[in-house]
């Protein structure tokens, strides 16, 4: 993740504002809000501004993922990428056992705890594959993103910087 984040920041630096860079990073799979908050700290963006921008950036793709991921997967299953899609679905299925058991709270916690392989993108894919109602998925994911933003703000800016 570090190489991807550094490469993205280096590529976008001097081409756009630091705020727009962290917005773009927060929308990207893998990097998401975690990467956006780390980049914000490196780019010296105020933590409050960074948190708001990263939350917005991380939320933007969610409705699209929820609406279209099943259709996209079905299309890719008809191509040479089918093995990859089946493997990916299996990996997602393995990650979703706790979410399936605890539904909305499980999805919220999955998104809220900023660990590799968790986050809004994966949470949205899981919610879509498990057949969550759009409203329930969006609410759980949104609040998970907010909690992840708070955690990442503390980690990226330090505990004292979070309260000052």
Image (spheres, rainbow, N blue to C red):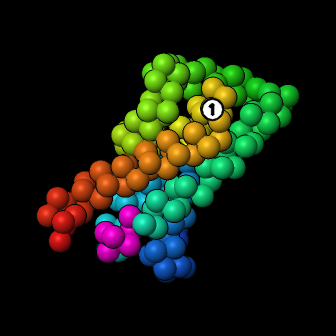
Q: Nearer the viewer, residue 123 or 91?
A: 123
Query: At 71% from the left edge and 39% from the top edge, which residue is drawn?
Result: 69
Whole-percent x and y of residue 22? 46, 66
Whole-percent x and y of residue 9? 46, 66
Query: At 49% from the left edge and 50% from the top edge, which residue is drawn?
Result: 142
Q: Nearer the viewer, residue 3 or 86?
A: 86
Residue 69 in sight in this render: yes
Dominant secondary structure of the residues highlighted in magenta in the image = helix
Whole-percent x and y of residue 119? 47, 42
Name the residue that disc number 1 marks. 132
**Image quadrant where residue 112 sits:** top left
| Left or right, 18 with reference to 113 | right
Whole-percent x and y of residue 75? 83, 34
Query: At 53% from the left edge and 46% from the top edge, which residue is drawn?
Result: 139
Vertically, is 164 above or below 114?
below
Where does the magenta region start and end? 46-51
Query: Label 1's element?
Result: loop
- Quadrant of the image for the C terminus? bottom left
- Is 28 included in the stretch rendered in magenta? no
Dot 1 crowding, Cα within 10 Å, few <14, some 14–19, many 20+:
some
């Amino acid at each position: 993740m570090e190489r991807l984040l550094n490469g993205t920041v280096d590529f976008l630096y001097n081409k756009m504002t630091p705020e727009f860079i962290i917005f773009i990073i927060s929308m990207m799979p893998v990097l998401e809000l975690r990467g956006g908050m780390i980049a914000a700290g490196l780019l010296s963006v105020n933590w409050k501004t960074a948190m708001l921008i990263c939350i917005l950036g991380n939320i933007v793709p969610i409705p699209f993922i929820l609406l279209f991921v099943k259709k996209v997967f079905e299309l890719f299953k008809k191509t040479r990428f089918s093995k990859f899609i089946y493997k990916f679905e299996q990996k997602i299925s393995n990650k979703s056992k706790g979410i399936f058991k605890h539904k909305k709270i499980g999805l919220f916690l999955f998104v809220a705890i900023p660990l590799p392989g968790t986050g809004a993108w994966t949470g949205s894919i899981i919610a879509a594959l498990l057949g969550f109602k759009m409203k329930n998925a969006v609410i759980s994911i949104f609040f998970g993103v907010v909690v992840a933003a708070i955690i990442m703000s503390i980690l990226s800016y330090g505990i004292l910087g979070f309260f000052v």
